[in-house]
Image (tube, rainbow, N blue to C red):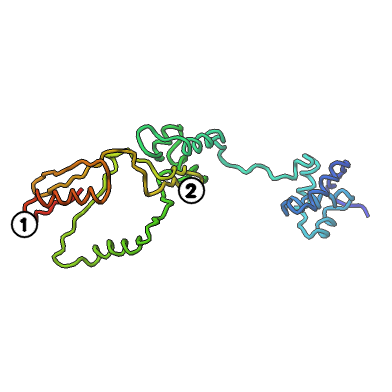
Amino acid sequence: MVQRGPQAPLVVLSDDERETLERWARRHTTSQALALRCRIVLACATGATNKQVAAELGVSLPTVGKWRSRFVTRRLEGLVDEPRPGAPRTITDEQVEAVVVATLEETPTDATHWSRASMAKRSGLSKSTVGRIWKAFRLKPHLTEGFKLSSDPQFIDKVRDVVGLYLDPPERALVLCVDEKSQVQALDRSQPVLPMLPGMPERRTHDYVRHGVTSLFAALDIATGQVIGSLHRRHRSIEFKKFLARLDKEVPPGPGRAPGLR
């Protein structure tokens, strides 16, 4: 019986093409779509018609015709998905790498850490682009975490006392606020600062080592603005008690006259 209608293009495979098609069709890492296209072309190469191939593989007749024609025209390259339409990429890998390296290894001249605006100015990219790069590499320059816990055996009890003082203060209690201003001494962290990494912010210990030889104790009388201070060679409880004794002598008695220690 003579077949009517247009004839399907003949598929003739070279040995290399057949080997490649068979390998793609059976590899587990090959996408199912590509594996099906390879089986269609292999079946067409046996001389079967589009209708026979469609019935054998359980696909539609137009699908067989499409991939038969694509292979005849472009060979193996025609079976691979074509690039999807869309705007071309404008940011190069080198620009992305430059932002990541600068974030991890540099600091801005007028700040302690990078912001989107400062990094955008340095890199020449937009702030939103910098934000997407940081998000992709899980970089958070604005965060700093502590990684060391107190070794004080009474730490929990002391925390409860301090928190309890704020939540339920005693009646007619006098609270002296003591704050340590570390800027007056040469200090260093007890352990090196751990740099920021992708997915992990910069980390530093909460405690530090003193390198200075002078300790300043000072109290501010918030009512008069008077400052009472004293210098000591060491920074211990003994020196602090001496300073409190001096305050007790110099501040006149009376309600509302207790200085807020700083």
Camera-side residue of 135 and 218: 218
List x then y, in percent, for residue 185.
29, 39
Query: Mark 1 packing: few (<14 Cα in 10 Å), some, or many (20+)?
Result: few
Mark 2 element type: loop
Q: Which residue occupies 13% across, 43% down?
A: 227
Residue under circle 1?
254
Left or right, 145 with respect to 72, comes to left
Query: Mark 2 packing: few (<14 Cα in 10 Å), some, or many (20+)?
Result: some
Tally the numbered discs. 2
Q: Which residue occupies 9% across, 54% down?
A: 257
Q: Tell me the CA gap for discs 1 and 2.
A: 53 Å
Image quadrant where residue 174 sits = bottom left
Q: Which residue occupies 14% across, 48% down?
A: 246
Left or right, 56 with respect to 184, comes to right
Camera-side residue of 185 and 83: 185
Q: Are marks 1 and 2 in contact (CB under 8 Å)?
A: no
Residue under circle 2?
200
Kind of residue at badge 1: Gly
